[in-house]
Image (cartoon, grey):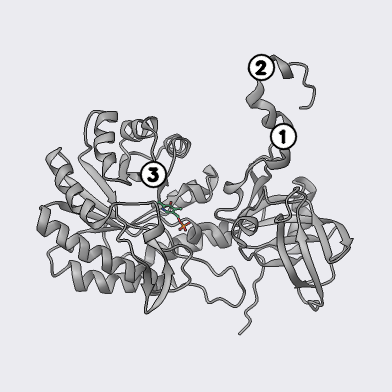
Amino acid sequence: MIMKKEPFVTKEQLQEIVKKYPTPFHLYDEKGIRANAQALKEAFSWNKGFKEYFAVKATPNPFLINILKEYGCGCDCSSLTELMLADALHFKGEDVMFSSNATPADEFKFAGDMGAIINLDDFTHIEFLEQTIGTIPETISCRYNPGGVFKISNSIMDNPNDAKYGFTTEQLFEGFRVLKEKGAKYFGIHAFLASNTVTNEYYPVLAKTLFETAVRLKEETGADIRFINLSGGIGIPYRPDEEPNDIYAIGEGVRRVYEEILVPAGMGDVAIYAELGRFMMGPYGCLVTTAIHQKHTHKEYIGCDACAVNLMRPAMYGAYHHITVMGKEHNVCDHKYDITGSLCENNDKFAIDRMLPKIDMGDLLVIHDTGAHGFSMGYNYNGKLKSAEVLLKEDGSAQLIRRAETPEDYFATFDCFDILKDMKYK
Ligand SMILES: *Cc1c(COP(=O)(O)O)cnc(C)c1O
């Protein structure tokens, strides 16, 4: 079954947008973001305390985060600057989850000062946190890593045993005891055991493990468990033949295990938290780029004005991103291309041996599903500058929500050295 993947923007709309904001840029779909955030909220409305803490690292853009805020989302932060961003957007105290690892002291300090919920990654962080902020917060969370492999009906989804994150089972129980002794009153557990799962089963299977663990933790340590954080990991269909997750089925699946395990244990008031990133934004962003070169050597290449600096996933993980040649949606895909960026790295290819319609110079290419872990993973290799981000609003207009980097930005970190004092490139 080949399903079609269509851009959320038309060629005519894009031609207007590029007059004002030259390619490359990431474009986001306000309508899609809103509808999806609403669906998530409805899917978990059976749980009174449900809250999505958007994983800021996926798409750290204040305009987009503010849209999610309207649907009751908080922020899941992983670093100092992400905490600062949440703070600047007036997310308060328990609207912020701080799920970090190998955490520097100043980050715990900032999180403590703003009253964020701290999600500890390791047993030793209990003491480190106490020394750093002078106390153990009343509300505290621990990240769990049961080890082994994470399976859903015999297929291996991921390998927690190899993951650097979280407490072992033994450490988790001991950690809760120690935290309680040190004054913690309200507890949460968190686990992230598989990434980009395109199955409705991931959350329910994970929830079962966490719910059973929570019941034992309560019985054995007497901890008052207030929330269970299923974290990120709900995936999106990057490939056109993949079936998208059904968030209502996922919410229902979690509800079933909640009623089977938590309710009979007298834990029917536990809140369910999520820290979704990819699912919230991935499909609602795309990278828009122009074909600027064609090269015929041992293979056929199309060189475009975006590169891995704008979207690293293909280079980093060999990830598939669907590509639409705008205006040629109905043409036959009878040309085999490598679609490349301009980095001096042979893995700077958005697609390899991809069958596409014939591409002409100046064609606009839409690289799909870059709304999460797209722009944000960017870097500055080869001195390339990061692109702009543009929001396609519900009324069809386009709003610049981050300007493109300039050479001045790139050189800004040398501003304390005389060596560039005569720099004239702005
Ligand atoms: C990256 C991350 C997320 C978001 O993951 P997605 O795959 O984008 O859903 C959530 N929580 C933590 C702790 C993370 O590191």
Q: Is residue 48 left or right of residue 328?
A: left
Q: Amino acid at mark 3?
A: Asn
Say above or below: 174 vs 153.
Answer: above
Is the residue marked by circle 2 packed among few (<14), some (14-19), or many (20+) residues within 10 Å? few
Would the CB of label 2 be found within 8 Å of ligand 1? no
Q: Which residue is mark 2?
A: 417
Q: Residues under labels 3 and 2: Cα distance?
A: 33 Å
Q: Earlier in the sequence, mark 3 or mark 2?
A: 3
Q: Is residue 404 left or right of residue 75?
A: right
Looking at the image, in which quadrant does ligand 1 appear?
bottom left
Residue 208 rendering spot, x and y as whole percentages:
27, 69
Q: Which residue is mark 1?
A: 406
Viewport quadrant of the N terminus? bottom right
Q: Residues under labels 1 and 3: Cα distance?
A: 32 Å
Q: Which residue is mark 3?
A: 101
What residue occupies the far top of the structure in this picture? 418
Nearer to the camera, 317 or 366: 317
Residue 17 rendering spot, x and y as whole percentages:
74, 52
Nearer to the camera, 76 or 38: 76
Q: Amino acid at mark 2?
A: Phe
Q: Is residue 210 left or right of residue 249?
A: left
Say above or below: 267 vs 178.
Answer: below
Q: For mark 3, give the secondary structure.
A: loop
Residue 310, can we see it?
A: yes
Q: Residues under labels 2 and 1: Cα distance?
A: 19 Å
